[in-house]
């Protein structure tokens, strides 16, 4: 097993929002810190820094993960997707983002990126997800802006839009 030295930096290569990234980072650098402070990808927010609130959720190889609990070195060779990747093109919102806008699911917006990344992963895997499943996935997020009613309504609306798109394309 190699000996690690504090402060030593290592080269890390991965894909970020579809683009290759190569960056130097210390062994102790968290993915959330690497994204925000080294790469300037600030859509990922850091709330509790203990993996409890879910604000820092990104997708690692398509699965939601708390970036404050992942060492940057652990993503070597993996595909990282942040909220910045949701919009299909500049100035245009994704179906899920549009549903959040329409149903006021943004609330204050601090935890929204993490919630969007969790729901995006859910809808990619289960585009027909029901309300119970949506609520179960949201249970890993702590939002202090009152309830989750508008967020759930937005997610259900997005599921309905996905269903319409699938029917139109069939």
Image (cartoon, helix red, strand yellow):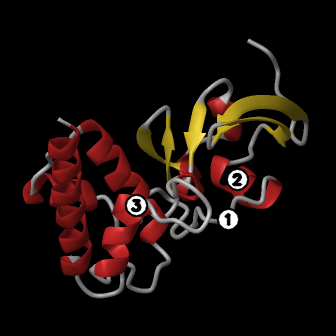
Q: Which is nearer the eye, 164 or 118?
A: 164
The local crowd at label 3, few if under 14, some if 14 to 19, many if 20 or more residues have their Cα within 10 Å, is many
**The label number, if any, that marks residue 50 in the structure image:** none
Q: Is residue 82 rendered to the left or right of residue 103?
A: right
Residue 145 shows up from this direction? yes
Q: Which is nearer the eye, 34 or 102?
A: 102
Q: Which is nearer the eye, 77 or 158?
A: 158
Of circles 3 and 2, the one toward us is 3
Q: Position of residue 50 (x, y in %)?
A: 50, 59
Q: Residue at x 82, y 27 (%)?
A: 4
Of callouts 3 and 2, the N-terminal one: 2
Q: Report the quarter where the C terminus lies.
A: top left
Q: Report the quarter where the N terminus lies.
A: top right
Residue holding disc 2: 35
Which residue ends up furthest to the right in the rendered image? Answer: 8
**C-alpha span from label 3 to label 1:** 15 Å
Q: Position of residue 54 (x, y in %)?
A: 42, 61
Q: Secondary structure at mark 1?
A: loop
Q: Residue at x 58, y 68 (%)?
A: 91
Of callouts 3 and 1, the N-terminal one: 1
**The label number, if any, that marks residue 116 in the structure image:** 3
Q: Is residue 43 rendered to the left or right of residue 136?
A: right
**C-alpha span from label 3 to label 2:** 17 Å
Of callouts 1 and 2, the N-terminal one: 2
- Cβ atoms under marks 1 and 2 closer than 8 Å: yes
Is residue 56 placed above or below 66 in the rendered structure? below
């Amino acid at each position: 097993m190699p000996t690690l030295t504090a402060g030593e930096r290592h080269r890390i290569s991965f894909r970020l929002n579809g683009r290759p990234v190569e960056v130097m980072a210390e062994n102790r650098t968290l993915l959330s810190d690497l994204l925000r402070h080294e790469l300037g990808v600030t859509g990922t927010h850091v709330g509790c820094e203990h993996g409890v609130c879910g604000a820092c959720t990104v997708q690692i190889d398509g699965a939601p993960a708390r970036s404050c609990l992942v060492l940057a070195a652990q993503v070597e060779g993996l595909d990282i997707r942040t909220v910045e990747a949701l919009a299909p093109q500049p100035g245009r919102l994704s179906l899920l983002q549009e549903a959040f806008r329409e149903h006021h699911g943004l609330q204050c917006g601090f935890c929204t990126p993490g919630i969007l990344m969790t729901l995006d992963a859910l809808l990619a895997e289960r585009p027909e997800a029901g309300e119970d499943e949506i609520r179960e996935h949201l249970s890993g997020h702590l939002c202090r802006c009152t309830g989750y009613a508008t967020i759930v309504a937005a997610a259900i609306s997005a599921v309905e839009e996905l269903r319409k798109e699938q029917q139109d394309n069939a």
